[in-house]
Amino acid sequence: MSLRMRILALIGLFLLLMATAGGAVMVANARDAVRAEMDSALELGGALGLAAAERGDVPGGIGLLNGLGLRHLRFVGADGPPEPESGAAKRRAPDWFAALIGGEPQERRLAGSGLRIVAEPWDEIAEVWEDMSDLAAAMLAVGLLLMGAAHLAVGRALSPLSRLEAGVERLRAGRYAFAFDGRGVPELVRLGTGIAALAEGLAAAEAENRRTGQRIVAAQDADRREIAREIHDELGAALFAIKVDAGRILRLRDGGAEAAKGEAAREAAERAAKILDAAAEVHNMSRRILARLRPALLDQLPLSEALAELAGGWMRRQPGVVLTLAIEPPSASAELDGCDEVLRLTVYRLVQESLVNALRHAKPSAVAVGVRIDPETLEVTVADDGPGLPGGDEPGRGGFGISGMAERVRTLGGTLSIGAAAGGGTRLSARLPRPTLSPPSPSALERMA
């Protein structure tokens, strides 16, 4: 049943209850009125009967008394048969209504006069029936008019709901321009205002998702360009040098002059040494590229040890920086190592990129890395004492950047905040739920990395 029909049914029920209550009151009042009228008629009939008895014309005066046409009264002889009821009015009221009123003929005998006085309620009941019929017809007409007016008023009041439904359908289709007129109905105005705010939030979230996607794509492209540049400039140059040196060694081997063999042997040794250096450089570069694509330490060590090795590597490269790593509580290392693969990779990337940003851009003298684990969350903090957060988002060498870190953390249902540290400098804090509920596939997160 629609809301309009429910409201109309409720109004109709109220009208029916009011009509029933009014009818019950009228019936109760009619019963009292009929009893009072019968008592009054009997008193009047008694007075007339006594007057006729005093004159001594009772037997012959019965017809005269009945001919007076007194309302409700009939005069009958004491020994005569009962005359038929004169109630022509009785035929105007249904029997069930007369039974409902409870009116029955009342009789009184005048002692010593041979006269019976009968008071009949039918005329009074007929009047009550006519009054109630007229009132019921009037109430029916008014009720129909009221229901019609209510139908129009409710339809007008609920008409904004159809526009609201159309607006919600547009929201579902991805069109977030939402405008709603509640026509002065406070509840609908509040509802429309809330949905409009929701639409603005959805539009802002979609715009932010687009911007984040663009930043991620830009970071991926920059990462690919950097890898391609290293392969072209460094790996290509190293392979070309190996090719040149190897060709020279072959030509020296095929040289025919005996006097030049000693010199050729020395040059061949030098070329072989250069080939070894180039091969070592290619090996180191391949390790750097692979480390950027996938941290090999996570495949070889538990996460706690991989973080310690990461921090130790930076300490060896930056001996002037005091770098500390703290896992709290101290007994939580086993829990940290037992996290799922996606969470382990996220924690490692957070620490890795934060250290790159801090040591490369902030030039600090001290950096503190903290990992705190509780039953529901895992928090990663990196704080330095540098000059503070530089303006803008500068992606680190790993192509992960601040925007990439925030997107990865949001994907896992966590939060990331970057601000000023307590003693100056910059502090990064990321809170991640554990265990991760319905994590995305590792390949999806590694594409963001």
Image (spheres, rainbow, N blue to C red):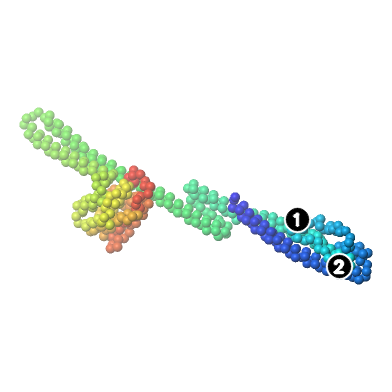
Measured as percent of width and height from the top left, residue 232 is found at 26, 40
Residue 110, numbered circle: 2
Residue farthest along the left direction in this orientation: 259
Q: Residue at x 52, y 56 (%)?
A: 191
Q: Is residue 118 above or below residue 160?
A: below
- In the image, residue 105 sits, relative to residue 409, either above or below, namely below
Q: Name the residue: 12% across, 35% down.
A: 268
Residue 187 showing in the rendered view: yes
Q: In the image, residue 301 lies at what x, y percent?
A: 24, 47
Amino acid type, residue under disc 2 in the picture: Leu
Q: Is residue 61 left or right of residue 367?
A: right
- What residue is shown at x 75% (from left), y 58% (from top)? 99
Q: Quadrant of residue 115?
A: bottom right
Q: For mark 1, what is the residue?
A: 96
Q: CA distance from mark 2 to mark 1?
A: 33 Å
Q: Of callouts 2 and 1, which one flags the residue occurring earlier in the amino acid sequence?
A: 1
- On residue 328, the disc is none
Q: Nearer the viewer, residue 78 or 129?
A: 78
Residue density around tag 1, few if under 14, some if 14–19, many if 20 or more, within 10 Å:
few
Q: Tell which of 435 and 41 is nearer to you.
A: 41
Badge 1 amino acid: Trp
The quarter holding residue 10 reads bottom right
Image quarter for residue 93? bottom right
Q: Nearer the viewer, residue 177 or 412?
A: 412
Residue 310's spot in the image, x, y percent? Answer: 24, 50
